[in-house]
Every structure is written in structure tokens, then in C-alpha cells.
Amino acid sequence: MSASGVVMGDTLVSTTGGPDRAGESRAAAAAREREAAAAAARRRARRLAAREFRPRASPIGLVAAPLLAAAGGAATVEVVTALVGEPAGLLPVDRWAAWLRATAWGDPSMRRAAAVIAVAGALLLCALLPRRRPRTLPLHGAGPLMAAAIGRRTLQRALAAVALAVPGVIRVRVRVRGGRFRRRVTVRAFSGYRNPANVQEMVRDAVEARLAEMGLMDGRQVHVRLTWRRD
């Protein structure tokens, strides 16, 4: 912003250039627009990476989901219509109730039915458990239409190599933990020094710097557990 002065009698009156103030306002508005566009691009990139690298549904889950939804819907309709006094008759409720009243808990047919239900529940659990921790972690792409990811084991090996490069560290084990919540990196390091001094801080700084270089979309806290020679 430029300023000029005008002498009026014995008084100096300063004036401010109007065009410069308007130019600064336009520059600030343009900067805000650029920041908003960059934030929107980051959100699009995050959604793309989440869609491309989310765990896929297993075949068992794809088959079981519509079957369970249909069974639950039919049971709901049957219960509601029975409560109003006009059963829909979608399910043979009366026949099932008569069979249950006539069958003892120790009957072989009851045991077989219980075994079938238990096996089906175990299969569903096995099908859903792998979805809890994805094998790949999304990275910031070069653009909103580019999705990138790194394997969990590859990331662990890269971080272990960085930690091993710290002077005094002779053994390292790295675990990248957490999925949606409690994201963290746990580093277990062993130093050959009898007095490790600030080795723990050096390992943490090296791992955090490497994580920043890789550009993970989801930040992770680094926890370092250092042990050293006692003899």
C-alpha cells in the first residue's frame, strides 16, 4: 500500500491510495478462493482413496446380507400383522411353534439345528473380521482424480529401515496399528549403548519425518519403546 502527503498550511495530511487497497482486497479474495479450491480437492481425493482402497465385501457376506434382510423383513411383517389380529402367513409360525413345544432340548433334531446355527454364525464372523483392518493405507495423490496407497507391511519395513539408521539402534520392530480409530505406529527399538541418552527422541523424529514424507492421509501418532544394554 502506498501513501502520499499533502501540505496544507503548517499541517502534513497523509492520503492513502485507493487503488492499492482495492488491489489488496482482490488478492485476499483470490487467496481465499485458492484455499477453498485446494480444500475441496483434498476432500475429493480423500473420498476417492477411501472408495478405491476400502476392504471389499466377501462372497459369504454378499450372499448372507440379502438373505438376512429378507428373513428379518418377513419376520417383522409376520409379527406386526399378528399383533393386529390378521397374520400375513408368510412364515409357518404355527407349525414351528407346535414343533418347538413337542421337541425336547436333548432331541437330536434340536441339537442338529443348534449346530447349524452355530456354524452359520461362525462363518459370518470369519467373513466380516478381515474388514476391520485394511491391508493398504491411502496416500495423498498428486490430484483429486488420482488415488494412491501403500501396503501396511511395506510401510512397516520402510519405517524400520529409518529407525535402524539412527546411531546406536541395532534391532527394531515396527507395527502400524489401528484402522478408523486410535491410529498409531509402535516402534520397539534396542540400542547397543549402555547409556542411550536421546536415542529414543532421535528414533521418534526419524520415523515421524519419514511418515510426513510418505504423505499418509490419516495421521498417526508414533510411540517408541527403547531398551538398551544393562551389562
Image: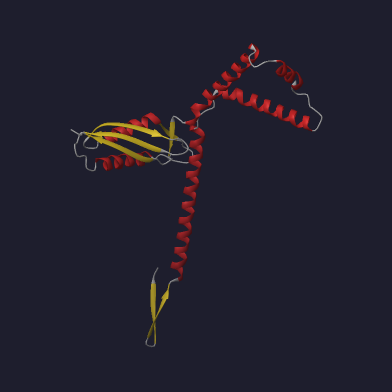
Q: Is residue 226 left or right of residue 85?
A: left
The image shows residue 137 at horizontal and vertical percentages of 43, 34
**Residue shown at 75% from the left, 32% from the top:** 80
**Residue shown at 33% from the left, 30% from the top:** 157
Q: Looking at the image, is 5 positioned above or below residue 61?
A: below
Q: Looking at the image, is 152 positioned above or below residue 116?
A: below
Is any part of residue 59 visible from this angle? Answer: no
**Residue shown at 78% from the left, 29% from the top:** 82
Q: Looking at the image, is 118 positioned above or below residue 49?
A: above
Question: In the image shown, does 76 or 60 lie closer to the viewer?
Answer: 76
The part of the image, by quadrant, that contains residue 10 is: bottom left
**Quarter that holds the N terminus:** bottom left
Q: Is residue 114 left or right of residue 197?
A: right
Question: In the image shown, does 97 or 132 lie closer to the viewer?
Answer: 97
The image shows residue 161 at horizontal and vertical percentages of 29, 32
In the current view of this chain or complex, which residue is farthest to the right?
A: 86
Q: How many marks?
A: 0
In the current view of this chain or complex, which residue is farthest to the top?
A: 108
Is any part of residue 188 visible from this angle? Answer: yes
The image shows residue 114 at horizontal and vertical percentages of 61, 18
The image shows residue 231 at horizontal and vertical percentages of 18, 33
**Residue shown at 65% from the left, 28% from the top:** 69
Q: In this view, does 222 lie to the left or right of 73?
A: left
